[in-house]
Image (spheres, grey):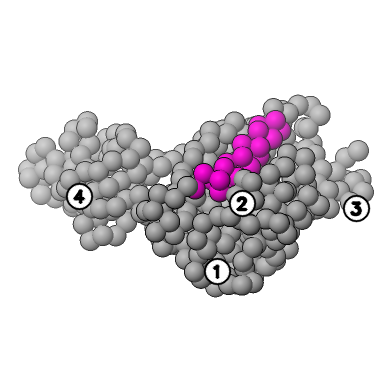
Amino acid sequence: MTAIDLPPSLLATLPGSAYTDPAVFALEQAKIFEADWFCAVRSADLAGPGAFETVQIGKESVLVSRGRDGRLNAFLNVCRHRGARLCTSESGTVKRAFQCPYHAWTYGLDGKLVAAPNLTGMPDVDRTEFGLTRLHLREWLGYAWVCLADEPPSFEETVIGAVTERLGGPAEIDAYGIDGLALGKRIEYDVRANWKQIIENFMECYHCATIHPELTEVLPEFADGYAAQYYVGHGAEFGGEIKGFTVDGSEGVDRLPGVTEAQDRKYYAITIKPGVFVNLVPDHVIVHRMFPLAADRTLVRCDWLYLPEVVESGRDLSRSVELFHRVNLQDFEACERCQLAMDSRSYARGGVLVPSEHHIGAFHDWVRARLAV
């Protein structure tokens, strides 16, 4: 049976090569990850001037740092002299400047070239023109979002627009006060699967009854196979005997003060393409950031965020962390299981989507459109 003669109940997926071909992945790097807004760094991780992180966005290494004026800046992590990698550490702090370890070209926290051997003998060298290559940066939800494109797409239409599309309006997420929350736990997952596998898995719940026993105990409607993202504005309700979004359904921690009665005892999931998941529950928020490293490998950083006073008090967060940690492990194992078959002749033309997964077809259409540009 080909995609042409599928029954109406089924939709065709992307072909297997979309998940394995290095050429496809290279195209995605150029036309998606290096063209869209990318959630790079949690702002609070860069506490003071000189604090920095390096992140991989597409094929580029990006340096995000805090300047002396307190603002975050993003640059390509490349010395303008001979192209040496400027910072090789994933994170750290410099006192006054970034210095290339090759020829000692030195750049201020604002990216301006401030010193180099014999620079005074080259008065025609413009120190701003030959400074670090600056990138576009926006802060939102307590994270720094970076775009490598010369002309970035509208942040309001793409990033904030994804939240509006899912929740019905941008004000719905403001109730959670995410930019004022504190990091309670961070776990990194090295997933041996294509980034699209992870997005597709997160967007549907057809698999929930099969592999997520803890999650369906807390959110019984997920056992029916329809994910919250299937419906605009819908939040999955906690089970009647469930007290909190925890691994055993026991009571959680302090409810976020802005959460409304309509949002209480509900779970909302949001996908912000190309690689961010935001999970909203009454007492905490979980943010996934994906860093695609190869066609068959994706690093996922997952942050559990709570009220600052909850984190500072040292309260036990393990039961709420454990619930989604288990969900992550279950999901990523499933993604890796699928990845193993993406180069099989059986999947050369792809697979199919059942009705509760039809919204994933819109994601596939988005990928096709972006790569065709």
Q: Earlier in the sequence, mark 3 or mark 1?
A: 3
State the separation of the CA atoms marked 2 and 1.
Answer: 19 Å
Q: Main secondary structure of the magenta part?
A: helix
Q: Which mark is residue 108?
A: 4
Q: Earlier in the sequence, mark 3 or mark 2?
A: 3
Res 181 quadrant in image: bottom left
Question: In this view of the protein, which residue sits in the foreground, 168 or 372?
Answer: 168
**Where does residue 344 sit, x and y in percent of width and height?**
76, 26
Q: Which mark is residue 250?
A: 2
Q: Is residue 168 above or below residue 273?
A: below
Question: In this view of the protein, which residue sits in the foreground, 221 or 238?
Answer: 238
Q: Is residue 277 above or below residue 342?
A: below
Q: Which residue is mark 1?
A: 259
Quarter of the image with the N terminus in it? top right
**Where does residue 369 sit, x and y in percent of width and height?**
66, 53
Residue under the point 50% across and 65% down: 256
Please indicate whether residue 50 sits to the left or right of residue 286 in the image.
left
- The residue tagged with tag 1: helix, strand or loop? loop
Res 43 quadrant in image: bottom left
Residue under the point 52% across and 51% down: 287
State the separation of the CA atoms marked 4 and 2.
Answer: 51 Å
Instruction: Please name which of the two marks, 2 or 1, marks the residue nearer to the observer.
Output: 2
Q: Residues within 10 Å of mark 2 (few under 14, many from 20)?
A: some
State the separation of the CA atoms marked 3 and 2.
Answer: 43 Å
Q: Which residues are magenta?
A: 317-338
Q: Is residue 234 visible?
A: yes
Residue 335 drawn in magenta: yes
Amino acid bearing label 2: Ser
Q: Earlier in the sequence, mark 4 or mark 2?
A: 4
State the separation of the CA atoms marked 3 and 1.
Answer: 40 Å
Q: Which mark is residue 8?
A: 3
Amino acid bearing label 1: Val
